[in-house]
Image (cartoon, helix red, strand yellow):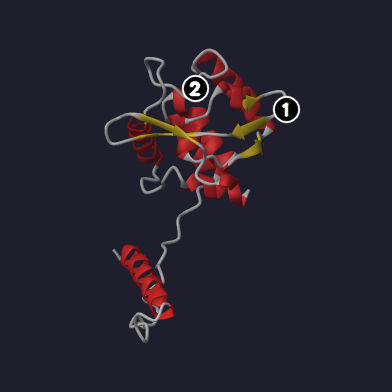
């Protein structure tokens, strides 16, 4: 696609610029105006009402996940990696110290957030404290290292289970093209 082409062009231009600096070639042949610019589609920002409609439609185990994505701005991997010890209900804070993904073989990959700036402490809106407290009591794994978001059998919530529930809920609410990541834009806007 256009985005991949632009990235490839920028990489090739950078390599050839180094070749010019090293005296291997006399001039960089990558001179196409605008070829390295990625066209980016503006993503929609859901309304608060749409978020609550989705949260009230999705499987109850994932209701708080939707609210945290929309009002705290957590990424999917950060939500899936969230543990009880990362949640401070008294201080109304969430510490983002890890993320969890699945590799193509279904193995859990737990590691630090996407970037150094991804390690952060975020304010938990007072309006979500009671919801999160109830969620922890009903669905989270036990112990400080227990995952906050779990599947029906009590194991860590699988990304594909979340995606299926998300797709179903957003379609029911009438926003079938809304991505889970779009909820972060609402958090940033608020």
Q: Secondary structure at mark 2?
A: loop
Q: Residues within 10 Å of mark 1 (few under 14, many from 20)?
A: few
Residue 131 seen in render: no
- 100 or 45, which lies in front? 100
Residue 112, placed above or below residue 35: above
> Which residue is tagged 2?
147
> Which residue is tagged 1?
91
Indicate the position of residue 103 as horizontal and vertical percent values.
Answer: 32, 35
Please, which residue is most extreme toward the right here? 91
Mark-to-mark CA distance, 1 and 2: 19 Å
Q: Residues within 10 Å of mark 2 (few under 14, many from 20)?
A: many
Residue 9, placed above or below residue 44: below
Q: Is residue 48 left or right of residue 182?
A: right
Quadrant assignment for the N terminus: bottom left
Indicate the position of residue 8 as horizontal and vertical percent values.
Answer: 33, 66
**Residue drawn at x 39%, y 40% as measured from the top left:** 170
Residue 19 lies in quadrant: bottom left
- 170 or 23, which lies in front? 23
- 49 or 111, which lies in front? 111
Residue 73 seen in render: yes
Indicate the position of residue 109 as horizontal and vertical percent values.
Answer: 40, 32
Residue 30, placed above or below residue 42: below
Residue 136 lies in quadrant: top right
Q: Secondary structure at mark 1?
A: loop
Please, which residue is most extreme toward the front here? 23
Indicate the position of residue 9 as horizontal and vertical percent values.
Answer: 34, 71
**Residue drawn at x 51%, y 37% as measured from the top left:** 112
- 93 or 55, which lies in front? 93
Q: Is residue 75 left or right of residue 1?
A: right
**Residue drawn at x 49%, y 28% as measured from the top left:** 63
Q: Is residue 101 left or right of residue 72?
A: left
Q: Are marks 1 and 2 in contact (CB under 8 Å)?
A: no
């Amino acid at each position: 696609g256009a985005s991949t082409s632009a990235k490839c062009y920028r990489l090739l231009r950078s390599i050839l610029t180094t070749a010019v600096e090293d005296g291997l070639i006399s001039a960089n042949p990558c001179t196409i105006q605008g070829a390295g610019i990625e066209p980016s589609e503006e993503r929609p920002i859901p309304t608060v009402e749409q978020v609550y409609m989705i949260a009230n439609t999705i499987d109850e185990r994932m209701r708080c996940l939707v609210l945290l994505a929309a009002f705290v701005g957590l990424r999917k991997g950060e939500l899936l990696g969230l543990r009880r010890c990362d949640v401070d209900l008294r201080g109304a804070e969430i510490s983002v110290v890890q993320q969890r993904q699945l590799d193509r073989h279904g193995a859990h990959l737990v590691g630090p957030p996407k970037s150094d700036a991804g390690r952060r402490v975020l304010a938990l809106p007072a309006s979500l404290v009671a919801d999160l407290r109830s969620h922890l009591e009903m669905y989270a794994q036990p112990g400080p290292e227990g995952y906050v978001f779990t599947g029906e059998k009590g194991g860590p919530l699988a990304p594909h289970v979340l995606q299926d529930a998300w797709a179903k809920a957003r379609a029911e609410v009438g926003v079938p093209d809304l991505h889970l990541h779009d909820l972060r834009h609402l958090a940033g806007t608020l």
